[in-house]
Amino acid sequence: MITRMILVNVPKEKAAEAERLWKQECAPLMIKQPGCLSEQFLRGRENPGEFISLSTWEDQAAIDRYRTSEAHKAIQQHTRALMNVAKVEVKTYEVMG
């Protein structure tokens, strides 16, 4: 299993929009992808403009398939408006236990 974290920082005035976009548009698409075992969206308690998309995948092949899918393209279109004001970092971790 692989856990994938997408760390997103947006200006505080864009936090509500980022949360709405993820909950209504992005997460429902991602969780339907073959090999996506779970998806959570975390908001920073100290910084409400800081979010983490935390997803667990069967393997790297499932992530690769998702990244070339129509769902991934749709998610990119939904989040495009925020990308010019957001800082985004993607990290992946192997689940060891």
Image (spheres, grey):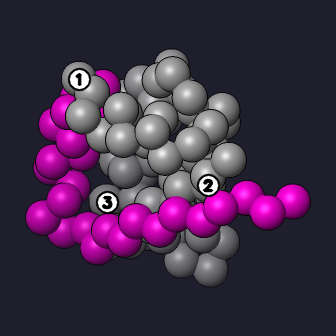
Question: Which circle marks residue 3 in the picture?
Answer: 2
The location of residue 50, given as percent across then percent down, is 48, 70
Q: Amino acid at mark 2?
A: Thr
- In magenta, the rendered stretch is 71-97
Q: Is residue 78 visible?
A: no
Residue sitting at 24 percent across and 34 percent down? 68
In the picture, measured across the screen, residue 43 lies left or right of residue 79, that is right
Q: Which residue is mark 1?
A: 70
94 part of magenta stretch: yes
Q: Residues within 10 Å of mark 3 (few under 14, many from 20)?
A: some
Q: Amino acid at mark 1?
A: Glu
Residue furthest to the bottom in view is: 46
The location of residue 25, given as percent across then percent down, is 37, 28
Task: Label 1: state its secondary structure.
Answer: helix
The location of residue 83, given as percent across then percent down, is 19, 59
Compute the Cα span from label 1 to label 2.
Answer: 21 Å
**Front label number (3 vs 1):** 1
**Front label number (3 vs 2):** 2
The disc, 3 or 2, on the residue closer to the chain's N-terminal end is 2
Q: Residues within 10 Å of mark 2 (few under 14, many from 20)?
A: many
The location of residue 19, given as percent across then percent down, is 45, 47
Compute the Cα span from label 3 to label 2.
Answer: 26 Å
Q: Which residue is mark 3?
A: 14
The disc, 1 or 2, on the residue closer to the chain's N-terminal end is 2
Quick one: quadrant of the C terminus? bottom right
Work out whether 28 lies above or below 85.
above
